[in-house]
Image (cartoon, helix red, strand yellow):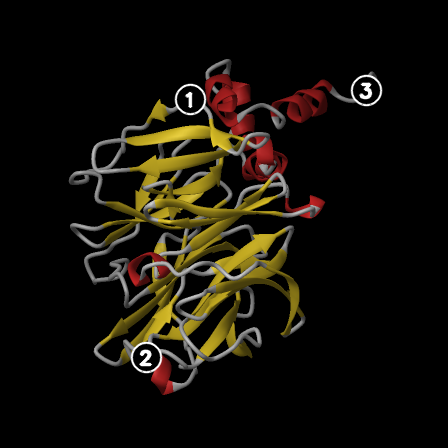
Amino acid sequence: MADLPIHTIVFEILTRLPAKDVGRSKSVCKQWYALLSTQDFVRIHCSRSLVSSNQRVLLIDDLTCSVRPIISNNNDYGPSSIVTFPFHHQNNDVSILSHLNGLLCVCLNHTYELLLWNPTTTAFKCLSTPDSHGFYINNLDAIGLYVDADDDYKVLHIKRRSGVLGVYVYSREVDSWRNIPFITRQEYLSPHFNWSTGTFCGGTLYFTVCECWIGGTNVVICFDVNSEQFKEISFPPVPSIGMVQGVLVNVKNVVHMFASTAMFEMTIDLWTLQGDYWIKVLSCPPIPPISLSLWCDITHYVTNGNWFVMTKSGKLFTIEMDMKPFECFYPVSWFRGFKGAVFVQTIVSPSI
């Protein structure tokens, strides 16, 4: 260490600071401000921030928005900090669509506008344009947030409008939208199919595309973020009787799926993707009958050896697992009655 240049030593120390401390450090001097604003610094600091102890849960209800740390040893939240939205909204009508490296892609429900927002730095960027790009309609559109090989953060927006499919990519680097081709089966354009939010893993965005009635077609659409090519792979081989729901998660850069099947005594299996094929990891015991309204909102997360199944009304049940690789949280839509997301505190900016 004594032989290293002082600039290198300072760089190594500062890239290990918490995100909020980096923000404060920018005011030390002009040299530090310039250093802490470089893309190299932001990229390395982000890579060192992606640890479970740096994860927070953002909770939104009709009155408040708060951020809380996650206490993994007892599966609870720490003290909350109230967050003020830095953008105009109406009664907290904000939906969180996707997250990546501390950035959240959100929709303002009263205007349909898309935004990128870093809740740690409070910086945000409106993605909507006068030529109708960047407007999101729930239950029709799909969103995926990703970063390409050139370290450019991008948003993939799949739009279904009256049987016409449009696929658009927003680039943070050039601050604009562009259309890209998408060749797939025409029936996926139908409102009978539900598209999930994209899950980014290993240079690919993954979407589940599920038919809305019992025994319908279920597939996974993959988008290579560097070649910008789409392909279709099969769903895990789950029973086709009853309703089917697939929830994708990124577990240590490997895609996994929680596949829920049946309608009365529901079962949930955890699958992992190897190549283009699914391998079952584990199954849970049959779940007692629950109401259809709760069934349709089921999401999942895993932490500290426990697998939680959630609905918008709160925690449904817990399954204990003896699997060390799963000792961290994964994003869900509902947390004990709140809508929200799990995110990592970083200094990644929504704009250049």
Q: Are marks 1 and 3 in contact (CB under 8 Å)?
A: no
- Residue that carries the numbered disc 1 in the rendered image: 79
In-front residue for pair 242/151: 242
Mark 1 vs mark 3, foreground winner is 1
User: What residue do we see at 28% from left, 65% from top?
Assistant: 139
Q: Are marks 2 and 1 in contact (CB under 8 Å)?
A: no
User: What residue do we see at 75% from left, 21% from top?
Assistant: 5
Q: Position of residue 278 (x, y in %)?
A: 63, 71
- Residue that carries the numbered disc 2 in the rendered image: 189
Q: CA distance from mark 1 to mark 3?
A: 38 Å
In-front residue for pair 11/310: 310
Is 3 left, or right, of 194 in this rendering?
Answer: right
Of callouts 1 and 3, which one flags the residue occurring earlier in the amino acid sequence?
3
Does residue 132 sit above or below 35 in this rendering? below
Residue type at mark 3?
Met
In-front residue for pair 40/71: 71
Residue 351 seen in this snapshot: no
Of callouts 2 and 1, which one flags the residue occurring earlier in the amino acid sequence?
1
- Residue that carries the numbered disc 3 in the rendered image: 1
User: What residue do we see at 33% from left, 39% from top?
Assistant: 124
User: What residue do we see at 58% from left, 30% from top?
Assistant: 53
Residue type at mark 1?
Pro
Mark 2 vs mark 3, foreground winner is 2
> What SS does tag 2 mark?
helix
Residue type at mark 2?
Leu
